[in-house]
Image (cartoon, rainbow, N blue to C red):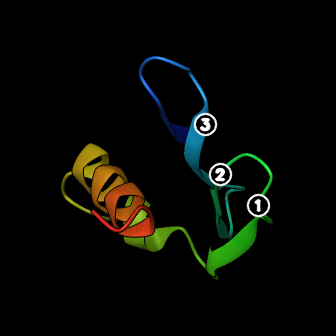
Amino acid sequence: MAEVKHQRSRKTLATLRCDCERLFARVGTSGPEVERSPTCSAIDDGVNKPRAIREALEQMLGR
């Protein structure tokens, strides 16, 4: 699981997780968790996994 948190308040802004098959995403703490991809290959199969995670989280937050 990867999370983006507000630095001061520690409030979760976005969450990205893989259940070994599907990729799920949530924006905010109370928003619904939605399936972002039917596979985790977009994150797992990349050359630079940390960069792929960061780019996915930034895209979710519109940055």
Q: Residue at x 68, y 67 (%)?
A: 21
Find the distance from the CA under tag 3 to the CA under tag 2.
6 Å
Q: Is residue 1 visible?
A: no
61 lies left or right of 33: left
Q: Nearer the viewer, residue 24 or 63?
A: 63
Locate residue 45, reporting x and y percent. 35, 65
Locate residue 35, reporting x and y percent. 70, 76
Against 51, residue 62 (above or below) is: below
Identify the residue position indicated by label 2 in the image: 28
Q: Disc 2 residue type?
A: Gly
Identify the residue position indicated by label 3 in the image: 12
Q: Nearer the viewer, residue 53 or 27?
A: 27
Find the distance from the CA under tag 1 to the CA under tag 3.
11 Å
Q: Earlier in the sequence, mark 1 or mark 3?
A: 3
Q: Residues within 10 Å of mark 3 (few under 14, many from 20)?
A: some
Identify the residue position indicated by label 1 in the image: 31
Q: CB under 8 Å between callouts 1 and 2?
A: yes
Q: Residues within 10 Å of mark 1 (few under 14, many from 20)?
A: few
Q: In what element is the residue under mark 2?
A: loop
Q: Disc 3 residue type?
A: Thr
Q: Nearer the viewer, residue 27 or 50?
A: 27
In the rendered view of the protein, which quadrant contains the C terminus?
bottom left
Q: CB under 8 Å between callouts 3 and 2?
A: yes
Q: Earlier in the sequence, mark 3 or mark 2?
A: 3
